[in-house]
Amino acid sequence: MNWTAKARTAAAVAPSAAKPGPTGSAATAHKNARVSNGMKEFLWLISDIERGRILDLGPVWQSTINFFIERGYRISTEDLLRAWKEYLTTEEERLRQAPVGEGERVSQGALAEKFLETALRYPEDSYHGVLAWDLFDYLDAELLPRLMARIYKILAPGGAVLGLFHSRAPERFHRYRIVDNQTIETLPAPTIAVHARVFQNREILDIFGEFRSSKTFVGRDQLREGLFLK
Amino acid sequence: MWRKSSEAKTTGASQTPAPAPAKTQEKPQVNSQSTAATPNVTQAASPAATTTGKPTTAPATPAVVAPAAPAAAKGAASAPATATPTREPVAADGPSTISAGLKIKGEITGTSDLTVDGETQGKILLTNGRVTVGPNGRVNDIDARDIVVFGTVQGNLKASASVRLGPSSHVEGSVLTPRISIDDGARLRGNVEMVRPGETATTDKPEETKTTAAARAASASTSED
């Protein structure tokens, strides 16, 4: 799939434009709703796929599940950031409990490898869309490239990844859920991870180096939305 | 036989203004009868009965007396000597419970509802029942009509009517149901697939992609040639 190859037919655009009534009012009803051109584009890219598979790497939300289910997609969720932090906590606890001299400290790289032995275990080419939200901003430098390789592997050719990148360190930790075709809601949440870094645009392109093409949108809140195609 | 909760309430209320000595005399008598006839008297206690029993029994006796309160009321109204409490089938209609601290290995099947607040290892198959996993519950696969989860599930959930994931739920596995309700705070690692009532799942594995399907078709045609 390609932005140039996939013509913007009226039918393809229709889902976002056809239902201004209820979805529009839903967007305004949510306090923290923000217009997301990245989401709009993401949905347009996967709109041709019948019973496509979506992977949400954030927590599970009723609204996000409903949104995709109603459109005939199948959706999986895996709160990767929470899983990673819990894994680190468990490992630290294991080390603390180990008798002196027996607990061998492992490197961050080894931890990342071990974590991915149990996380994000899906068949190759099995998803048509991945919602990563702002996950990449919070990951360790050792885990990030390994995770990118895994995401690339499980994504079907032509599949898309939607990622959000902060332009400056956020004041609060947020979670995200879909409100409608072009609106997402940012929900303040208890902090489970510290913001690790602010990516420069060049760095973003580098970590998605394997992907075929990319597109970036900048919102009014300076949150950058990146869409990457396999 | 126990009275209906509405009757118990009524009689309990009417008994309250009665002289205190009469109540204290009758209570032990009925309690001894009821405990002898119904060994599972604590299970037979319905919330209504418990509530009704409190005003009369609280001052003198512990909570065990509560289920006997309706019978006591009955006895007070007629003849205490002829009061013959029968074996109480109230629990038969209510959900079976695996309470916290219990651990069961193996498949669980049946037709009634089930509440699990303990741990089960094995499939729970109640195709016409409702399975509730309590906050302390830890279970594996569930196949039921309705599933409500507040605890931990490591396995697949398959419901013919609905699934609800409560705020404290933690599910690792697939969810297959016509209707799903997810509370904020629920945790799910796995896929959600909606089916119409009566429809069966297509597959648990992610669907093969067009490229792999095309490659397979190409290899098949090559082998046919």
Image (cartoon, coloured by chain):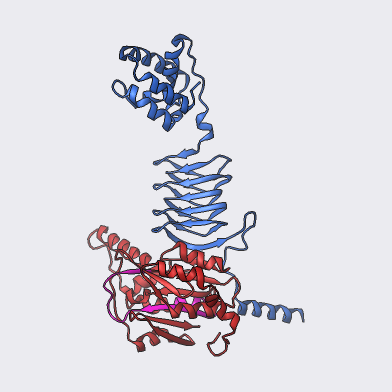
Instruction: Determine the residue positioned at 49% across, 15% down.
Output: B84
Q: Which chain is blue?
A: B
Q: Give the range drawn in magenta.
A: A149-175
Q: Confirm whether residue A227 shows in the render.
A: yes
Res. A156 visible in picture = no
Quadrant containing the N terminus of chain A in the rendered view: bottom right
Q: Where is residue B128 in the image (x, y as percent from the top left)?
A: 59, 44
Query: Is residue B34 inside the magenta stretch?
Result: no
Camera-side residue of B67 and B218: B67
- Residue at image position (48%, 88%) is A213
Q: Which shade of the palette goes to chain A?
A: red
Residue sitting nearer the eye, A219 or A153: A219
Residue A136 image point, x, y percent: 36, 76
Identify the residue at horizontal 29%, vertical 20% (top origin): B60
Q: Is residue A166 magenta?
A: yes
Image height of A127 relative to B46, above or below = below
- Residue B42, compared with residue A223, is above or below; it is above
Residue B82: image location, x then y, percent: 48, 10
Residue found 38% across the figure and 78% down from its top: A164
* Image-quadrant location for residue A144: bottom left
Query: Residue B191 appears at what percent x and percent y?
Result: 51, 63
Furthest residue in direction left, as rendered? A100
How many numbered marks does the figure carry?
Answer: 0
